[in-house]
Image (cartoon, helix red, strand yellow):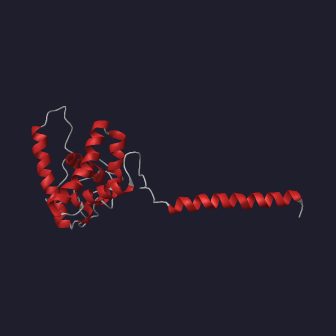
Amino acid sequence: MDRREAVTKVAWLLGGTVLGANLFVDMSCKPKAKKFNNEFDVDQVAFLDEVADTILPTTSTPGAKAAKVGAFMALMVQDCYTPEDQKVFEKGIKELDNASDKKFSKKFVELDPKQKTELLVQLDKEQKDYQSKKKPEEANHYFRMMKELTLLGYFTSEIGCTQALRYSAVPGRYDGCMPYKKGDKAWAT
């Protein structure tokens, strides 16, 4: 082995030691919450999925969680809401969890489906009262935002359009007098 080859091998050995030590230190530290986007972390998106799935649960069709409505909400709030509405929405996540803790002494995600529904029905009444009394320049109630985004996200998703609604990929001609029987699904196209 010549000098040049020996120096190269020693450099590789020392470099691997330094990189390995950094990797070991990074892995041994407490992991940070993984960010979903600039506004929300993965846990908040999972929380929003639970809220959405309580609003639109799985029945004969997949629910809102299957349509990944929580991720849709996080994206819409970050990209389309004003900073004031973003603050109301993010504060609402904490308020919803606090309301759950106050009423059932558990976090929202720990509740059974009946308790989740009971809490969200209570919040829906609260938001209706708030909306009827608020001034036009005031922000909407956080639960109204969550409910609207749940419906929008679900019914514009592939699952919502193709399984919850009647869907025709190529709809054909317009028929303004289409027969409709009570209980039929609405049309997506």
Q: Is residue 4 among the parts visible in the rendering?
A: yes
Q: Is 178 above or below relative to 134?
A: below
Based on the displayed image, in which of its 4 quarters is residue 54 positioned? bottom left
Quick one: 7 or 173, which is closer to the camera?
A: 7
Q: Residue furthest top?
A: 137
Residue farthest to the right, as pictured = 2
Task: Residue at 14% x, 33% y: name it.
Answer: 135
Q: Residue at x 33, y 58 (%)?
A: 46
Name the side, left or right, on which 1 lies relative to 118. right
* Residue 138 image position (x, y, % from top left): 19, 35
Among the 4 quarters of the image, the one containing residue 168: bottom left
Q: Quadrant of the N terminus?
A: bottom right
- Image coordinates of residue 57 in percent, x first then y, are 24, 62
Q: Is residue 82 visible?
A: no
Q: Quadrant of residue 51?
A: bottom left
Q: Is residue 128 left or right of residue 24?
A: left
**Residue 61 vs residue 28: left or right?**
left
Question: Is residue 157 or residue 9 the one in the foreground?
Answer: 9
x, y percent for residue 14 = 72, 59
Q: Position of residue 34 (x, y in %)?
A: 43, 55
Q: Residue at x 83, y 61 (%)?
A: 6
The total number of labels drawn is 0
